[in-house]
Image (cartoon, rainbow, N blue to C red):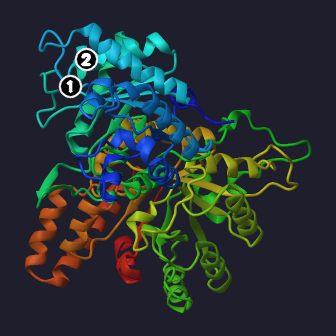
Amino acid sequence: MTTTLRDLLDDGKVHVLDGAMGTMLYSKGFFLNVCYDELNLKQPKLVQEVHEAYVRAGAEILETNTFGANPLKLGSYGLADDAEKINQAAAELARRAAAGRASVAGAIGPLGVRIEPFGPTAREEAFAYFQRQARGLVAGGVDGFILETFSDVDEIHEALRAVRSVSDLPVIAQMTIGDDGLTHYGTGPETFAKQLTAWGADAVGVNCSVGPAGVLEAVEKLVKATDRPISAVPNAGLPKDVGDRKIYLASPEYMASYARRMIEAGARIVGGCCGTTPEHIKKIRDYVASVVPRHQPTVVSRETIAAPAGVAEVPLATRSCWGAKLARGELVTSVEIVPPKGVDPTPMLEQCRALKAAGVDAVNVPDGPRAQSRMGVLPSAILIQKEVGIETVIHYCCRDRNLLGMLSDILGAHAAGLRNILIITGDPPKMGPYPEATAVFDIDSIGLTNLVYRLNHGLDPGNNPIGAPTQWAIGVGVNPGAVDLDRELSRFAWKVDAGAEFAVTQPVFDPAQLEAFLARVEQFKIPIVAGIWPLLSLRNAEFLANEVPGVSVPESVLTRMRRAQDKGKEAALAEGVKIAREMFQQVKRTVQGVQVSAPFGKVEVALEVFG
């Protein structure tokens, strides 16, 4: 059954709107003196192809090619009498392109004239124009409406009234704002959000005019003013005049990174306006998938999961040496060793032998960190345990595998002797050197934590018995320096409820920040392992501070690294190790373990931190 716009608005999840139609038609040789709305009749195949490109890119909501298809605007082309026919054809084209994979929203834009009291057009005239357009869209079979790029709240009110007079389908109502954050008429987001909510809009948002940064600011205001879903549909930056054309310069990656921030700020519908293309929407879709998995698993509280008759969960203390130390409340130590880029594991194994000789409890093995191509985490960890005889804590990310693939991996890894797992959602592929790689993100770290917790109780994801239970020590990631700490703590609470038994933090460079965080998570009563990252250089510190999501490097640390760097490379490395050693000494009294990174495989640097 096709998912309708009403379904998407009501399900509480984030959804992706399509991008620009006009930009795509312009790129195909139709210049601005052409009536783009008439192309629904004259060039239907072309319009349908644009819609289909957006569906392939991952759009879940298609807008009809009717932004200017009201009788007043069509009248300037001598097409006023064809308003209903053009709108009906547009809706039918979008529905054909959607083919059950996306919902269709009838797009209605402003009339292009001022209405009373600011202009000669009466409100009832405006209502009648919008009503004719809405009738055509309903006849074509839309799932709902999107009123967009309005500056005048009175005009959008007439459009909303007109739609309601012919249909009870849901309506997304979007205003447009300028660089000052206000509409052309001087109305702020808080004000128009309250008015649109009172008038019965099903979703409220902003589109067009400004690029992603301006729209993000508006979203932050909208969420405080309405309980309706928020839509955020920016242009691809502000247009630049290049010759006789306006070119939008915001890259797909830039748009997508802002889409993620808009979601974190509270947006439920994200897409693109002028200048955006299917490539922009594809990148946004990937980012949405990394924040909100495509498949929302039923996460059951650990308290309600009961093992089948005759099966008992194995206590944490007997699952692994790592689990035993955690269960006893002793400090655990680990060092992160990245798998090799090629097929030769020898250097990795040598590094691990050095760690074993130094008495480190376990080796942390990342899973495709920074979305780069490396030897798989599972064969790497199996080789380490078999050849070196030191336990591993495998990082396992949700980016690259679907639910069944993860289940197969985790059962196989357990059979091969692995016992400690750190479950993470994973970096989107766009962060790595293979931007065309696709992300799966079938479930996120909360869903996978719940899956492994069930396996530890002898149950598969469908609650079917699997025989003997697995014996995983289940860890999750957590970020004390998250920009939105309330959201991070909310997700952490879900992870604990899903079955997490320990947590490893992002690299910590600020003891006060960690202390404040620990006070807030004390209620969860699970061991916290602090991440510690020895800095190799000022450039390394600046990279972590500015380019690695979720890592917070205080200005005091950057200042120390700048001073050391002035004295040379060796002084900078020494200072980086000194900062890490200080962190270790300060945090080991308040956490139950440390995970030290071995930057660029420099095991000796990591071991100095414990020294």
Q: Quadrant of residue 604?
A: bottom left
Q: Which residue is mark 2?
A: 155
Q: Secondary structure at mark 1?
A: loop
Of 269 and 226, nearer the camera is: 269
Left or right: 384, with 489 as reference point: right
What is the x, y in percent for residue 548?
Answer: 32, 61
Give the amino acid at mark 1: Ser
| Residue ID for mark 1 | 151
Residue 598, picture quadrant: bottom left
Q: Residues within 10 Å of mark 2 (few under 14, many from 20)?
A: many
Residue 508 shows in this picture: no
- Is label 2 in a helix, a strand or a loop? helix
| Count of residue discs | 2
Instruction: Give the residue drawn at x 25%, y 17%.
Output: 155
Give how far across and how far down residue 32 sits, in percent: 23, 47
The residue that appears at 67% across and 60% down in the rendered structure is 406
Of 299 and 362, nearer the camera is: 299
How far across and down, in percent of the image, does residue 142 sit?
52, 29
